[in-house]
Image (cartoon, rainbow, N blue to C red):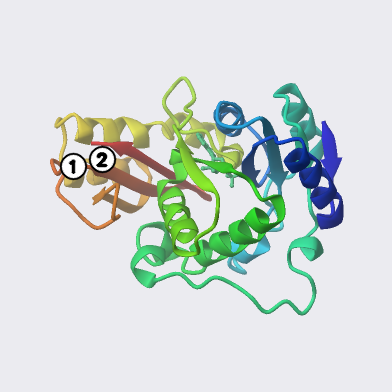
Amino acid sequence: MHIVRTKAELKEAVKRYHQEGQTIGFVPTMGALHKGHTSLIETAKSHADVVVASVFVNPTQFAPHEDFDSYPRDELADLEILEEHKVSLAYLPTVEEIYPEGNITSILLDEKVSKILCGKRRPHFFDGVATVVVRLFNQVTPDVAVFGEKDFQQLSILKQVVNDLDMPVKVIGSPTVREDDGLAMSSRNRYLSAADRELAPKLYHLMKEVADGDATIEEAKSALYHSGFDVDYLEARSAVTLEPCELNDSNARLFAAAILGKTRLIDNIAL
Ligand code: AMP
């Protein structure tokens, strides 16, 4: 596996892939890799000749009070996992490489997609994500890029950004990978205390109850609240437009975010 840390080195490697006629599949991550991330790598492999993965904790998607400084970083473990999964190129840029001093450009999304669901509590989050992803896409020049359905709002927004900006890359979604007890895998799950880790799968189980018609959204919210979750949102929205919808509408999806201790859990499932 080739490891690069600068745009110049990346460009050289990417130029070679293009000269060899190899298509590029790209998997951007913030590291602290788990099986959710490696499933994206496998999806990328099935759509492209070579896989490029990036590890970059993006400062512009964190608010000052959020966990940018304490976000889990373990470069050696990440590189081992990327190597194991036969990634061709690992791109680990510094903040300066992505945001050179004096840069003036960022993406400002329409509030109708960026200030709903997760964007309500994290108003700068999706602008930051779009800004870094556009920069990474321009650097890596992938043919396809793979994102997890775990972050469905992010996936949906990025599909639209690429379309709006006529970027020559296909954004592909890959299904959510869960622990055996149903909890959606996340780098932040390691923040959970032992007791909260035991409680955490309840979010998914109650969402399933709603999806199966065994509980209403209000009943699920109340059960979560009484179990110790601080529910941010639990609502049905269209998987296509992200607009609010009824549970039984076609394309309806159930979206949830709830805080347990210091950890914000998010999840979504088809209805
Ligand atoms: P992150 O490192 O958390 O920014 O995530 C990088 C990519 O991995 C994003 O496209 C996420 O949606 C995806 N991802 C994170 N967790 C999971 C999971 N449990 N299942 C599938 N994809 C995931």
Whether residue 37 appears in this view of the structure is yes
Q: Are marks 1 and 2 in contact (CB under 8 Å)?
A: yes
Q: Nearer the viewer, residue 219 or 33?
A: 33
Measured as percent of width and height from the top left, residue 24 is found at 66, 39
Q: Classify 64 as above or below 47.
A: below
Q: Nearer the viewer, residue 41 or 222?
A: 41
Quadrant of the rendered structure where residue 58 is? bottom right
In terms of image quarters, where does ligand 1 lie?
A: top right
Mark sitting on residue 223: 2
Is label 2 in a helix, a strand or a loop? Answer: helix
Q: Classify 116 as above or below 168.
A: below
Q: Amino acid at mark 1?
A: Glu
Q: Classify 185 as above or below 72.
A: above
Q: Residue, x 41% and y 46% (percent of image)?
A: 152
Measured as percent of width and height from the top left, residue 66 is found at 59, 61
Mark sitting on residue 219: 1
Quadrant of the rendered structure where residue 188 is? top right
Q: Residue, x 55% and y 53% (percent of image)?
A: 168
Q: Nearer the viewer, residue 11 or 249?
A: 11
Q: Nearer the viewer, residue 94 or 4?
A: 4
